[in-house]
Amino acid sequence: MDALFPAAARRKTTTTRCPPPANQVRRPAGPPGALCPPALRRSRLSTAAMTGPSRSTTAGTRSGRWEVRSGRRNMPGRARRTTTTWWRWAGWVADAVVPPTARERMEPVCHALSAGAPSQIEGTTSAGADDDDPSAEAAKYSERLLNEGHERWEGDRCPICFLFIGLPIHKHSRMNACCMKLVCKGCGLTARQRGIYGRCPFCRTPHRLTRHPNSQLSTMIQKRVSKGDAEAINHLGQMYYFGKLGLAKDVPRAIELWTEAAELGSLDAYHELGVVYYTGRGTEEDKPRGIQYWQQAAMKGHVESRRMLGIVERVNGNYQLAVQHLMISAKMGHEKSLNKIKEMFKEGCTTKAQYAEALLGYRDAVEEMK
């Protein structure tokens, strides 16, 4: 040690109160054993292993400086001076563990991985580019069509008892023109038993009979239409399509009203548009457009639209797809869908297990609506 560092130099080094800046630290040449004791070398090696091979000499020096400052508070006497002496060589020990040339060879590897290897986002983008294939888009849409719309939409609930109205809806409920709410016949009967006569069981609006009831109903419906009620617009479209309430039959006007109601969220309007375009009654026949309207309604829980999709697939010879659509509508309580599956079972187009599944699903749905 005296050969490398004279006593005067060592005294001068140990009495230094503040370490010099990192850019002024000089590394003397010599073997590691002569400059760094084994115990301190092990501590520095563990520090280098924790900090990683890419840690620079300045960073290692700064970490040593922090250790010295914290050690000065707790280490008295010679131990403190020794620690103050050896902190200078922490950067040299790090270079002894991982030489600079090795670090230079290791650093470009990370850059190569980040630059050359595709990331998850890039993989998703490249996979999304392949999804532009029309066949892939059609497959995704078909999967979505079968996976969505297994529950009836909230418009089929009675606003009083909050239970789903039995199917078909027009046989188990009544539309009130004052508020355009479908109230199930059970709640209507309960209202009459409690003495509510001549009034709406939901909004309590009096139903005064006049000499011209059609004009009165038309006025109520127009009032709701002016407020942007989707169901009122859909109902007025039906009146124009069939020429009721004293209105002249006007199919283009009905289609216009149904389109507006569909944009406002009426699934019944989607279904009516599908029927008109698929059958061509009153307008030019456009089967693909009609099927598209049914699909949009079916994915949101419209039972009748789902049944129509099953019938279309059966007519086209796609029996397995037809059974899947009819199965969904049967499990929502649609009796006609169950009867269609029964007919297909008799024809050998479906299995006994599928018919049994549809029968059990229909039974559970009916029990929930009671």
Image (tube, rainbow, N blue to C red):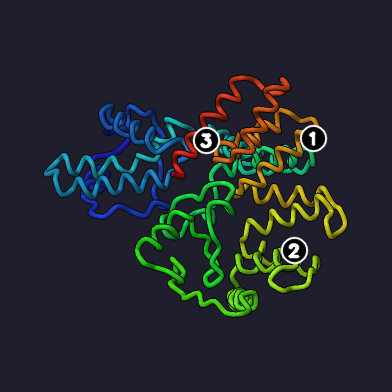
| Picture quarter with the C terminus | top left
Task: Give the image quarter of residue 83.
Answer: top left
Q: Are marks 1 and 3 in contact (CB under 8 Å)?
A: no
For marks 1 and 3, give the CA distance.
71 Å
Answer with left or right where residue 187 lies relative to residue 64. Answer: right
**Residue 223 marker:** none
Picture coordinates of residue 312 (x, y %)? Answer: 76, 39
Amino acid type assigned to the residue bearing label 1 in the image? Val
Whether 86 is drawn above or below 200: the answer is above
- The x and y percentages for residue 299 are 63, 47
Classify mark 3: helix, strand or loop. Answer: helix
Q: Earlier in the sequence, mark 1 or mark 2?
A: 2
The x and y percentages for residue 135 are 78, 38
Q: Which residue bears the numbered disc 3?
A: 103
Q: Identify which residue, 253 or 120, lies in the foreground.
A: 253
Q: Seen from this angle, which residue lies furthest left?
A: 76
The reply, left or right, for residue 138 in relation to residue 193 is right
* CB-based contact (under 8 Å), mark 1 and mark 2: no
Q: Mark 1 against mark 2, which lies toward the viewer? A: 2
- Mark 2: which amino acid? Phe
Q: Are marks 3 and 2 in contact (CB under 8 Å)?
A: no
Q: CA distance from mark 1 to mark 2?
A: 28 Å
The 10 Å Cα crowd at callout 1, few under 14, some 14 to 19, many 20 or more, is: few
The residue that disc 2 covers is 242
User: Of the residues tagged 1 and 3, which is closer to the observer?
Assistant: 1
Tell me which numbered mark, 1 or 3, is placed earlier along the sequence: 3
Q: Nearer the viewer, residue 219 or 271?
A: 219
Whether residue 226 is visible here, answered yes or no, is no
Q: Secondary structure at mark 1?
A: helix
Q: What residue is shown at x 78% (from left), y 55% (from top)?
A: 276
Q: Up-down: is 256 above or below 70?
A: below
